[in-house]
Amino acid sequence: MIIIAGTVTVKQGLRDEAMRAASAMVEATRAEPGCRAYAFYADLQDPHTFFLFEEWESEEALQRHFATPHMAAFRAHLPGLLAAPIAIKRYAVASAVTM
């Protein structure tokens, strides 16, 4: 399993536009084979900071995601929204336990 976790900070005045772009990404990505979870969450302290969480069944599923038209459109739109570079970490998880 692959986990992606990141922080995205958007420019002042562009929060609503960023939320629309993120919502479209979430809807399209959750329909992809191999996607277990995909979400953006708003920071409670800073309304211009969002957290990204992804969970993928395999490396192959994640690579297919990177090649989708909606990912290409999102990547093209993102630079105009960003106030800072995206900080992303990728984790390879051998096992997970539901608690």
Image: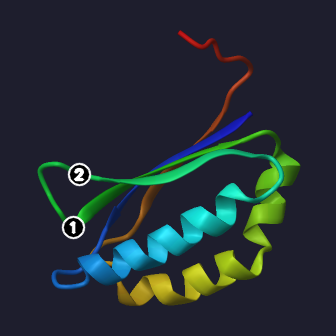
- For mark 1, what is the residue? 48
Task: State the residue in front, 67 or 18.
Answer: 18
- For mark 2, what is the residue? 43
Is the residue under label 2 in contact with that under label 1 (CB below 8 Å)? yes
66 on left or right of 64: left
* Residue 4 drawn above or below residue 15: above
* Residue 24 drawn above or below residue 31: below
Residue 38: horizontal and vertical position, in percent? 58, 51
Residue found at the far left of this picture: 45
Locate residue 37: give its quadrant.
top right
Q: What residue type is labelled 1?
A: His
Q: Which amino acid does label 2 sit on?
A: Asp
Q: How many labels does the image show?
A: 2
User: Which quadrant is the N terminus positioned in?
Assistant: top right
Q: Dot 2: few (<14), some (14–19), or many (≥20) neighbours within 10 Å? A: some
Which mark is on residue 90? none
* Residue 16 drawn above or below residue 80: above
- Residue at 50 percent across and 52 percent down: it is 39
Residue 62: horizontal and vertical position, in percent? 76, 54
- Residue at 65 percent across and 17 percent down: it is 96
Residue 22: horizontal and vertical position, in percent? 46, 70
- Residue at 36 percent across and 77 percent down: it is 18
